[in-house]
Structures are given as C-alpha cells and as structure tokens.
Image (cartoon, rainbow, N blue to C red):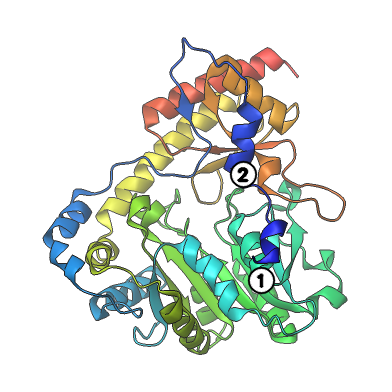
Amino acid sequence: MNPHLNQLQPYPFQKLRQLMEGITHAAALEPIHLQIGEPKHATPDFIRQAIISHLDGLSIYPTTLGAPALRNSIAIWLGRRFKGVEINPETEVIPVNGSREALFSFAQAMIDSSVRDPVVVCPNPFYQIYEGAALLAGASPHFINTFPDNQFKLDYAQLPDSVWARVQLMYVCSPNNPTGSVMTLSDWQELFALSDRHGFIVASDECYSEIYSDEDNPPLGALDAAHQLGRTGFPRLVVFNSLSKRSNAPGLRSGFVAGDARLLEKFLLYRTYHGSAMSPVPQAASTAAWNDEAHVVENRRLYAEKFSQAIDVLSDVTAVQMPDAGFYLWIKTPISDTEFTRRLYRDYNVTVLPGSYLARNAQGMNPGEDFIRVALVTSPQECAEAMQRMKLFFEKLGI
C-alpha cells in the first residue's frame, strides 16, 4: 500500500461530522446548511436538455483529448472572458472531469519525485486537495499564511530561499477559497518572476472566477495576466476551471485545464493511462454551458442579492465585508471557531465550517483559526433566515 496515504489528514467535512457528534440541535428550527460550497441554484434547463439529446453518446468510448466542439467552445469562452487571450484548442486546452480531479492528478504528472525533497507550495488556508495531491506525489507541502490585514496577499518572504530552490509546483486560488481575495496584475507579475527564477510550475485554481458582484470588473485570471505581461505561450502556467460554480452543475463533473502546451502534452499522456476521459454526454452539455452567458449573469444576480442581505444583517454585530469574488463569507469569531460552529448548530440549527479545518499550522500558527467559512449557496430566503439566526447568536455571545 502507498505509504503516503498515511500522511493524509481527515477531510474537513469528516472533521466537522466528528465535531458535531452527540449534539442535539434545535429541533424547532429547520436546518440550514452553509458548510459546503455546493451550489443550490437550479441547473439551467438547457444543460439538462443537452444531456437528454445526446444520450446516444453512452455507446461511444470518449477520447482523452475531448471532442473538438467542446475544446473550441472553451477556447472561445476564454477569449471572450479574457480579452486578447488566444488559446489553441488543439494543444492548449484539455476537458477534465471537474477541477478537483484535475488539480489532484496534475501534481501526480508534474512532480519529479526522483529529485530529493521536492516541494509544493500552497496558500494557507487552502483547498485541501492541494495538500493531498502534493503528499501522494511524493512532495512536501509548504504553506504561505494569508491574513486580512493585507487583503490576504501571498507573502513569499515567509519561505526561505532554501525552500524555494526545491519548489516544483505552486497552487494558487484566485478568487480564493475561502477568503474571496483576487490576485492583482502586480501580484501575478511577482509570482511569475519567482517562477522564472526557480523554474516551478504555477497551477491556478479559478473555479470561482465567474461569481463576482461588479459586471464591469470581473476578476483577473492567470492567462489574462500572462497575456498582459507578454508571457507568450504561458510558460509553466496552467489554469483550472469548471462548470460547478459557474453553471450550478456540480454533478456534471466538468471543467478544463488550459495553458502551457508543453505541460499539457505530458498531462494528456498521464490522463490517457489514468483513464480520465469525459463521457460524450456531459461533453455535449458542457459545450452548451460554455456557449451561454445569460444563465451566469442571473447566477451572479442571486449571489449579489444574498451577499447584500448577509452584510446588511451581520454588519450590526460583527466585522463583515463583501469578498472580491466567490460565494463565501470569511468571518472572524469572538470565540474559538470550533466552539462557535458547535453552538451555532446546537442553538440555531445552522451549519458552517470552522476555518481552522481549512488551514494547517505553519510559521507557528494556524491562520484559519477563529474564522468560519459561510457558503451562501442555498436560496436567498434560506440565506436570509440563516443570517438572522447568526445575528442572534452574535448578540447572545455579547463579546
């Protein structure tokens, strides 16, 4: 058995279940689940219809590279979303079965474990798949803590040169899970310079890129930053995106990777042996989804409504602000994040996720400690009710 499996920690939701064991929640109140980033808005009907119309695809073995129609739709979408970005659909994009599996498998293909002590760098707090991918690829994860006092920017000086010299891969998440921060052009320029100096690959997780409040100011993406900075061919850069959040289709398990053709050629070879080709049925639905923007605009409208409600209610009792993008509130707690989570569930039947479960101890601290992540994924009515209950809890604490 792979000995690296013993290095994996329980997943955050497993920890949450253990935290809640033995608690009797307030039975008079309907449960509201805000702990997991699973969109609850309705999946657009045209995506459902595309699945029904292409069920004949069940009789066909798919290719790992994906159908030309899907790759073209992704390349066109990228050019439409990030003005001036040109992606070759033959060599610079691969459809994947959701960003999660691709983020994980990418490390397995890219890490050279024959080199002594390879390193993967992650932001902290972070999406736990990054750490698991690093460990199972035979690398050591190192973390850069992020804090609200500098808008959760990555401070590369936290890691010494002796670590950077061993870095082979760095995961970044912009818009960030859980903080909602978005990297600026100068942030990307600094990261690209570091990548050039040490030769590591940048894996940019952008699955929250289409959830933002200002229609005239969408979040900057890595490919867009590379284009603006004249980095032809996107050297050592691959981005990951999906339809789960953008199109309310988490069960479709559909996304893409795009960027450096040299890296994607090797990743495609890995995926061919891994057996991770997308079925023709979700490929057809995905093509339809990437070709349509109207449902995404409506999706953003619903999230904007929920954020407005939440901030209006909670700002009376705690410091809370609109994130740059994404659908999470990252809220400081007046007591420990785990105790806050337990008591909120017990007394008000609202479930959130302790921030410490999304981070690791690094540089002598856990930067997620005494925060909670609140996913505004359910209906506006349920979210409004949950915010009122949270307000009552903050007032009850009176700290």
Residue 303 — which label?
A: none
Numbered disc in front, either 1 or 2? 2
| Quadrant hosting residue 218 | bottom left
Apparent side of residue 116 relative to residue 168 in the rendered image (left or right): right
Q: Residues within 10 Å of mark 1 (few under 14, many from 20)?
A: many
Question: Label 2 amino acid?
Answer: Pro
Rendering coords of residue 261 (x, y %): 47, 87
Q: Label 1, on which residue?
A: 170
Query: Which quadrant: the C terminus?
Result: top right
Q: For the point 53% across and 70% down, which residue is it?
A: 105
Q: Label 2, on which residue?
A: 12
SS label for mark 2: helix
Rendering coords of residue 170 (x, y %): 66, 71
Return the residue found at the far top.
Answer: 28
Return the residue found at the far front.
Answer: 1
Question: Label 1 amino acid?
Answer: Met
Q: Between residues 94 and 314, which one lies in front from this camera angle?
A: 94
Alpha carbon separation for disc pair 1 and 2: 22 Å
Q: Residue 242: tell me if it is visible.
A: yes
Q: Residues within 10 Å of mark 2 (few under 14, many from 20)?
A: many
